[in-house]
Amino acid sequence: MIICSCNGLSDRDITAVIDDGASRLTDLYARKNCQVRCGNCLKNVKCLFREELQKRRASMSSAPVELYPLQPHDRAAACIVHQEVS
């Protein structure tokens, strides 16, 4: 799924850079040789990046994902991963 149409970033791109050792959002942009342009996708890119990173941390430490919670302010602005269905 395309997350950032300006740069053509997909959820697979996010997964791939984390698999390659990226641990910061800036790593994603550096490794894909792009930058934030219009900013409309940043919330979703950040959310998906953090979600994937949490999964890796949880599997590496055998700890539940809940040990690496999103910050309360991050939950207030739902992304495509954490949208509430009404």
Image: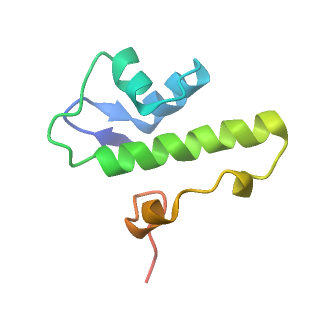
Please give the name of the residue rendered at 50% of the width and 23% of the height, measured from the top-left corner: 17
**Closest to the observer, 58 or 11:** 58
- Give the x, y percent position of residue 32: 35, 18
2 horizontally vs 85: left or right: left
Judged from this view, the residue extending furthest toward the bottom is: 86
Please give the name of the residue rendered at 34% of the width and 51% of the height, measured from the top-left corner: 43
33 horizontally vs 69: left or right: left
28, above or below 54, in the image: above
26 horizontally vs 51: left or right: left
Rendered-image quadrant of the N terminus: top left
Q: State the colouring used for the structure image.
A: rainbow
Please give the name of the residue rendered at 27% of the width and 30% of the height, measured from the top-left corner: 8
- Give the x, y percent position of residue 62: 85, 42
**Closest to the observer, 8 or 18:** 18
Rendered-image quadrant of the C terminus: bottom left
Please give the name of the residue rendered at 75% of the width and 43% of the height, measured from the top-left corner: 58
Quadrant of the rendered structure where residue 19 is?
top right
